[in-house]
Image (spheres, grey):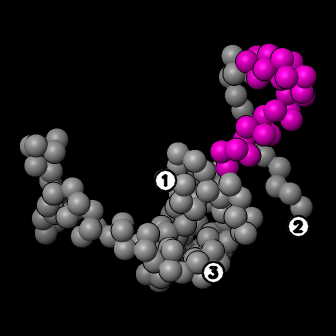
Amino acid sequence: MATPVATLKVSRQTYELLVQRARASRRAPDEMAEELIRAQVHPTDHPYIVRREGVRGGRPVLRGTSIPVWLIAAMWKAGDSPEEIEAAYPHLELAAIYDAISYYLDHQEEIEAEIAENRIERVLKDTGATMNAQGVITFSEADA
């Protein structure tokens, strides 16, 4: 499988800082940028799934997004087809959705724990919020 290629846009100021640091360390800017990115993005055994420091607590997300694997898995488990998930998230590639489902199947225990952690009942309990019959969530004054 070919290594995915991505384009990263940075501000002029960030680029100039990168070039300065690269010169100071006698390295190419591309080499230094790649090293910095690799330090923050941790590939997994699935091409479309990564773990990124500071994004979703380092939990698996679809590459190039902050969409967690557990969300795709929960939708699929609820009966949504990959094509229906793509319709809900049109910026995602269908291959990425299939890869998220595959990741879930390979790491079920981990992803099931994340699904449980994000169920509305758990979130309401953890935050002290309430939800009425119409689905409106209310937080107490102390939490606001």
- In the image, taking residue 67 as reference, residue 19 lies left or right, namely right
Residue 73 lies, in percent from the top left, at: 51, 74
Location of the N terminus by quadrant is bottom right
Query: Residue farthest to the left?
Result: 141
Q: Earlier in the sequence, mark 1 or mark 2?
A: 2
Q: Quadrant of residue 48?
A: bottom right
In this picture, is 73 found above or below 61?
below
SS for dot 1: helix
**Horizontal side, residue 80 vs residue 99: left or right:** left
x 45%, y 77%: residue: 112
What amino acid is labelled 2 in the image? Met
State the residue position of label 1. Answer: 57
Name the residue rendered at 90%, 28% in the picture.
28
Q: Amino acid at mark 3?
A: Asp
- Marks 1/2: CA distance? 28 Å
Amino acid type, callout 1: Gly
Under tag 3, what secondary structure?
helix
Q: Circle 2 sits on which residue?
A: 1
Residue 80 appears in the figure: no
Helix, strand or loop at label 2? It is: loop
Residue for badge 3: 106
Image coords of residue 10 (percent x, y): 70, 28
Q: Which residues are magenta?
A: 16-41
Q: Earlier in the sequence, mark 3 or mark 1?
A: 1
